Image (cartoon, grey):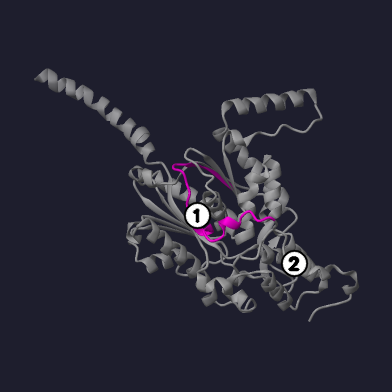
Amino acid sequence: MEFFIESLLYLLPLFYIIFYLCNNFVFRKRNQCCYILAYECYKATDDEEASRRLDSQSCTKIVFRNKNLGLEEYRFLLQTIVNSGIGEESYGPKNIMEGRENSASLTDALWEMDDIIFTTLDRLFSRKGISPSEIDILVVNVSLFSTLPSLTSRVMNRYKMRDDVKAFNLSGMGCSASVVAIDLVQQLFNTYNNKLAIVVSTESMGPNWYCGKEKSMILSNCLFRSGGCSMLLTNNNSLKNRAILKLKYSVRTHLGSNDEAYGCCIQDEDVDGYQGFRLTKKLTKSAAQAFTNNLQVLVPKILPLRELLCYTIVSYFRNYTKTSTKSQMINLKTGVEHFCIHPGGRAVIDGLGKTLGLNEHDLEPARMALHRFGNTSAGGLWYVLGYMEAKKRLKKGDRILMISLGAGFKCNNCVWEVINDLEDVNVWKDCIHRYPPKSIINPFVEKYSWINDEYLSFVRFH
């Protein structure tokens, strides 16, 4: 008996070490997974569809309402709209559609947020059969609107959520805020087990419409549209069979310490005191630098060793021999099958496509999301993902590279693995059969071609 007790005393430390190792490196790792159970993109209801649709005719009326513009600015605006890649069915803020862009109120701003946030959350809770009282983590990201109490508190009040919900309200994160929010949830999942999380990504357009005449600030009016998305995530392995995506990697890059990068995409006032969003010529350079820095970290995680070795050897050989041929381009398709690119504009999509060596099939989801819904800021990525799903491209085991760029300047990318074949037509249900269209030429091209006539150079609209 004494021998048994003595042996047990010696073995207790060993049992403790084994338990500690299992708890920290086996059991905890199992709970560090991040799954998406569902996502719901915003789409206007049938009753509001017509009044919210920002087609060519509506755009023209809004442009001509701005009495600060001369013919040169009109030409610039219309030419930008023509080349934006946005179609006839995107949505504008209610106060803009009603002609109140100069006098947006707090009520207008809250109505826009309530419409997008509550519409997507109502549909998400209903579709998945999840009660708001089951939510443990809530993250809302809206860059250009911060109210008191916060929008997160507004969501909790609407759905009467528990008082122990871990709530976060993110602002100022720009178009890449959605990936920032998901990264935050993943970090929380590393600490808390078996939790359900909600992420809401949208943007406040109505109160931030620019009414001045500076070209660098008027661009945002041509590109941004109303929209957003709500996502349901979990780290509960018992819900794995109900999940659609699993987060594999997430890498965030922030160039805020660089003055050019910080100021290339910034909320500002013009000389006349009109507030808006300034996009400078340094944006392209800053985006390229942030994207390159991000890929330097992400690529070794996702590509097979043979591709990395091949790229390294070929690059070294060309540098060593000082070969003047085009530099070796790494083949990301050996590590991912799909590319979910932020639909920030035609130039953004073209630039990323060229940099990554992608073909039109790869770029189609981003182009079509831009055409149908416009640049909806942080929510835009999910319209792209929805297009892939509606087209039945996403099969079990496929990997998706999600690429987002935003003010700061930030590049936040992540890789998802498809858990089950995805075939939900989602927000694209009523129009996916029309995409891709034979032509995406904007009606402005023919209807407003007169704006380029030289004999009108003396005209100023009033």
Q: Is residue 119 magenta?
A: no
Provide residue 13's location: percent of width, then percent of height.
25, 26
Provide residue 283's location: percent of width, then percent of height.
71, 53
Residue at the spot x=68%, y=55% of the render?
A: 438
What is the number of the mark on residue 425? Answer: 1
Q: Magenta stretch: give its range.
A: 412-438
Q: Quadrant of residue 419?
A: top left
The kind of residue tagged 1 is: Val
Comparing 42 with 390, the one in front is: 390
What is the number of the mark on residue 258? Answer: none
Q: Is residue 236 visible?
A: yes
Q: Is residue 436 magenta?
A: yes
Provide residue 37's location: percent of width, then percent of height.
41, 50
Q: Which quarter shows the C terminus?
A: bottom right
Residue at the spot x=61%, y=75% of the render?
A: 97
The kind of residue tagged 2 is: Phe
Disc 1 secondary structure class: loop
Comparing 371 with 308, the one in front is: 371
159 to the left or right of 355: left
What is the number of the mark on residue 444? Answer: 2
